[in-house]
Image (spheres, helix red, strand yellow):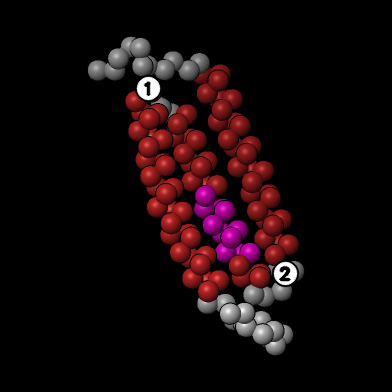
Amino acid sequence: MIDPKLAMEVPAHIRELAVKSVDQAEKAISTFMESASKSFAMVPAPMSDVAKQALTITQANLKASLDHARKLMEAKDIGEVLRLQTEFVRGQFGTAAEQFKQMTSSSAGSPKDDRNEPDLI
């Protein structure tokens, strides 16, 4: 049984406003990502590969955040909010570690610049 002190009674019109706000944010982010993706097409390789990878990671993180916001809007009590937040943060730590590995392995494996610059020791 839920402790009445922890129950959250969010008015329907507030919940609707929150849903619309998240939907608008998602559309704005989608438009931005499309524009960024098109602009990366003009960047010379290998930087375009790094930029595309960074964009893909950013998209995944934003999607996770928006999905999390939607779940929070459906929470029935403070306990559920805390559980959802804990799960999200744990998941994001794992995701961030994996994304870091991807970025460092791809940048470490990128070909060296051909401008005959001396190696620094």
Front-most of residues 88 and 38:
88
Question: Where 29 falls versus 40 (above or below)?
Answer: above
Q: Which secondary structure lies at badge 1?
A: loop
- The question of residue 57 being in magenta is answered with yes
Q: Which residue is mark 1?
A: 77
Q: Which residue is mark 2?
A: 43
What residue type is disc 1 on? Asp
Q: Which secondary structure lies at badge 2?
A: loop
Front-most of residues 19 and 92:
92
Question: Furthest-front residue in view?
Answer: 121
- Return the x and y of residue 119 as percentages of the image width and height: 62, 83
Q: Quadrant of the C terminus?
A: bottom right
Question: Where 3 falls versus 118 (above or below)?
Answer: above
Question: Where 49 falls versus 111 (above or below)?
Answer: above
Disc 1 to disc 2, how far (Cα)? 48 Å
Seen at 48% across and 46% down, the residue is 64
Q: Quadrant of the N terminus?
A: top left
Instruction: State which tag comes first along the sequence, 1 or 2.
Output: 2
